[in-house]
Image (cartoon, rainbow, N blue to C red):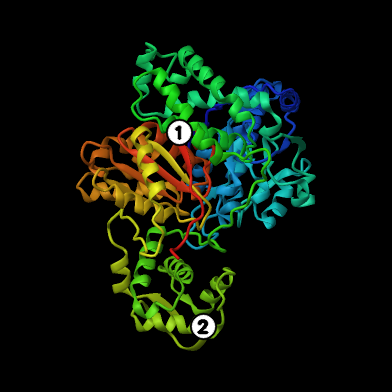
């Protein structure tokens, strides 16, 4: 079997803006020195303070170092060494998957808060075929990056048992990893890992902390006024790039695109315009306290830019921007005299989708429709729906459901009698069938029920319970935003009602837009494209699925009109819910590519937290907590 050696690639990344604050510049110089020697660092700093940009600066210094040049020179022999080592234990598809996925020389980032805890070890360290029922071989991210840098955001959020396993990874004398159920240990001496956390040192496992690198500390923006002043025009110009009508803006200044200039923010005219706007509002921004740091400041500035409707000229644009910012500054910052108030989450426990999120939803809708189940709380129904969905292929025993209930502390009744009563009701309603007797009894979803809930509508919207509060102001605000921008990320913690909000928004705007809703889950973005291929085949379009999935965004694009229809001249809206479950870098890259290329559709993502990669393409909208009507 012949193998193509993966190309040694230096990543093209956004470095943000160069700092002006003296302490920050000193920190950047310090990090440069560590990078020249390939010495890992661990970055401490509050959320939104720019930890990933510091890691990118590390990478920019690293690629200029003698170490990186040596890596590039010896890559061919290094690859052959890796291939020979793995060939002793793997062959065929398993070996091909690994070797073709290697990423030499790159910068890669991953956010720990966007990884479903049960998947964290698999994503970072990998797993073998059948390590869990039906699993295919998956190399870990740590294993795939060679001679490059991996940035791990919020490493303190990883499960503590995984932190213990990662001690061997970070220990410079060992630097070894192993897949789940792995056949071999693999060396990690040629990947530099840069962890970051917003947690204080004492909250991180001590044996873990002492192994992860030299500590560097990044301050919040309230202590960096010069950096704040420099960041404002940077964020403004990037926001102008994201507007749908940037061609109108370019005509105000007589700007013409070229091979060297591909975005407005790169032009001297827009840089000067953004600088003037920044000078106009800098003092108002600097007198406030910004608990969300650069992330909150960027969101306030973007919202003020996007809220401008049909500007006539640069002067009216400037006036509207300043007016809008008066509204958004208080939303995203605090008065210096005030202390920030913690807003409690609406629900005490989180329910994560199974790997079949569409089925989760459809089963839940059926449970809500059955009057004999009215005495079960809405939260318990969600737990039950997700469990039934996850077991729809294999079936389950009573004790399996007992264990699942006990994982959710908000459920009061987890006794054997309570569980048995729920199962018996589902059997009576012909939702479940049973085989066997006593403790060996197994339960399965009945064929008629499965056939009913597993419909072929790929993009169906969830139903909304009648007792949810109608958030008219937020719905109207989102409606205004999609008039001017095409890429929106709706962010809120689990339990804040993102899916219900999306459904209400779609129902309110269905006369104007055609909406296509898809719930992402553990299977990631690839499942969406596999489902799209099935949909196209049902329309008698013959496709080579193996070929189309190699460059899926580009290969599906010619068929977008077959998949998405427009209404009244407005572009169709594709909504990808649970985007935080797409935590692997390849999946994130696919979504970023989709956002960049699919200009035929408006794209809305929703999730618990927006991955840093999406900041270039998406405007973030934050939802507050909300619940049922009083």
> How far across and how far down the image is residue 327, in percent?
49, 36
Crowd around label 1: few <14 · some 14–19 · many ≥20 (10 Å): many
Task: Check contact, mark 1 vs mark 2: CB within 8 A.
Answer: no
Residue 437 x, y percent position in the rendering: 46, 88
Point 55% across, 34% down: residue: 103
Q: Is residue 480 above or below residue 390?
A: above
Q: Quadrant of residue 592?
A: top left
Q: Is residue 282 left or right of residue 468?
A: right
Which of the two residues, 307 or 544, is positioned nearer the viewer here? 307
For the residues marked 1 and 2, what is the alpha-carbon distance in whole angstroms?
48 Å
Is 464 positioned to the left or the right of 625 in the image? left
* Residue in the picture at 25% in, 46% down: 536
Q: Is residue 71 visible?
A: no
Residue 258 in the image: x percent, y percent?
39, 13
The tag on residue 284 is: none
| Quadrant of the rendered image containing residue 23 | top right
Secondary structure under the numbered disc 2 in the rendered image: helix
Which numbered marker is on residue 617? 1
Q: Would you name the residue on which mark 2 appears?
A: 418
Res. 397 in view: yes
262 with respect to 338 (left or right): left
Q: Residue at x 40, y 35 (%)?
A: 595
Q: Position of residue 356 (x, y in %)?
A: 41, 59
Using a 10 Å C-alpha cutoff, classify the residue at mark 2 as few (fewer than 14 neighbours), some (14 to 19) or many (20 or more). Answer: few
């Amino acid at each position: 079997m012949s193998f193509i050696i993966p190309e040694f690639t230096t990543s093209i990344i956004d470095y943000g803006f160069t700092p002006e604050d003296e302490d920050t510049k000193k920190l950047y110089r310090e990090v440069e020195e560590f990078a020249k020697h390939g010495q890992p660092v661990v970055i401490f700093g509050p959320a939104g303070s720019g930890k990933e940009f510091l890691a990118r600066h590390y990478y920019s210094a690293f690629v200029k170092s003698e170490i990186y040049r040596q890596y590039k020179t010896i890559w061919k022999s290094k690859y052959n060494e890796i291939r020979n080592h793995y060939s002793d234990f793997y062959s065929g598809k398993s070996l091909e998957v690994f070797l073709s996925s290697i990423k030499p020389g790159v910068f890669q980032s991953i956010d720990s808060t966007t990884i479903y805890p049960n998947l964290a070890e698999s994503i970072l360290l990998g797993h073998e075929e059948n390590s869990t029922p039906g699993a295919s071989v998956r190399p870990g991210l740590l294993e795939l990056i060679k001679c490059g840098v991996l940035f791990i955001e919020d490493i303190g959020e990883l499960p503590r048992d995984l932190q213990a396993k990662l001690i061997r990874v970070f220990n410079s004398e060992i630097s070894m990893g192993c897949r789940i159920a792995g056949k071999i240990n693999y060396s990690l001496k040629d990947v530099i890992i840069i962890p970051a956390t917003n947690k204080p040192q004492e909250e991180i496992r001590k044996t873990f902390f002492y192994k992860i690198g030299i500590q560097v500390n990044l301050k919040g923006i309230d202590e960096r006024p010069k950096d704040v002043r420099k960041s404002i025009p940077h964020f403004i110009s990037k926001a102008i790039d994201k507007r749908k009508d940037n061609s109108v803006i370019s005509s105000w200044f007589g700007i013409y695109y070229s091979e060297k200039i591909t975005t407005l923010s790169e032009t001297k005219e827009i840089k000067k315009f953004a600088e003037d706007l920044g000078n106009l509002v800098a003092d108002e921004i600097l007198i406030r306290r910004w608990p969300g740091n650069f992330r909150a400041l960027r969101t306030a500035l973007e919202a003020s830019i996007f809220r401008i409707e049909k500007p006539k000229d640069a002067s009216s644009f400037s006036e509207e921007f300043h007016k809008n910012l008066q509204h958004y500054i208080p939303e995203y910052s605090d008065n210096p005299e005030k202390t920030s108030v913690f807003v409690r989450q609406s629900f005490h426990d989180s329910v994560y989708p199974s790997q079949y999120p569409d089925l989760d939803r459809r089963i839940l809708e059926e449970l809500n429709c059955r009057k004999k189940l009215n005495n079960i709380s809405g939260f318990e129904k969600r737990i039950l729906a997700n469990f039934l969905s996850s077991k729809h292929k294999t079936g389950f025993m009573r004790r399996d459901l007992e264990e699942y209930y006990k994982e959710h502390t908000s459920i009061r009744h987890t006794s054997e009698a309570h569980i048995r009563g729920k199962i018996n009701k589902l059997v009576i309603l012909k939702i479940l069938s049973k085989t066997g007797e006593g403790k060996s009894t197994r339960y399965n979803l009945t064929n008629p029920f499965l056939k009913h809930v597993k419909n072929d509508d790929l993009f169906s919207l969830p139903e909304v319970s009648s007792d949810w509060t109608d958030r008219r102001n937020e719905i109207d605000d989102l409606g205004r935003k999609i008039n001017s921008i095409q890429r929106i990320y709706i962010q809120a913690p689990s339990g804040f009602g993102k899916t219900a909000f999306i459904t209400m928004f779609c129902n309110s705007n269905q006369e104007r837009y055609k909406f296509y809703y898809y719930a992402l889950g553990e299977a990631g973005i690839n499942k969406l494209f596999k489902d799209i291929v099935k949909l196209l085949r049902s329309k008698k379009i013959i496709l080579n699925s193996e070929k189309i999935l190699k460059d899926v965004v580009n290969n599906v694009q010619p068929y977008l009109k077959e998949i998405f229809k427009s209404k009244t001249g407005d572009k169709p809206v594709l909504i990808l819910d649970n985007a935080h479950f797409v935590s692997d870098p390849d999946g994130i890259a696919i979504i970023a590519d989709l956002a960049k290329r699919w200009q035929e559709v408006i794209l809305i993502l929703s999730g618990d937290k927006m991955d840093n990669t999406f900041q270039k393409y998406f405007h973030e909208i934050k939802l507050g907590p909300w619940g049922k009507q009083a």
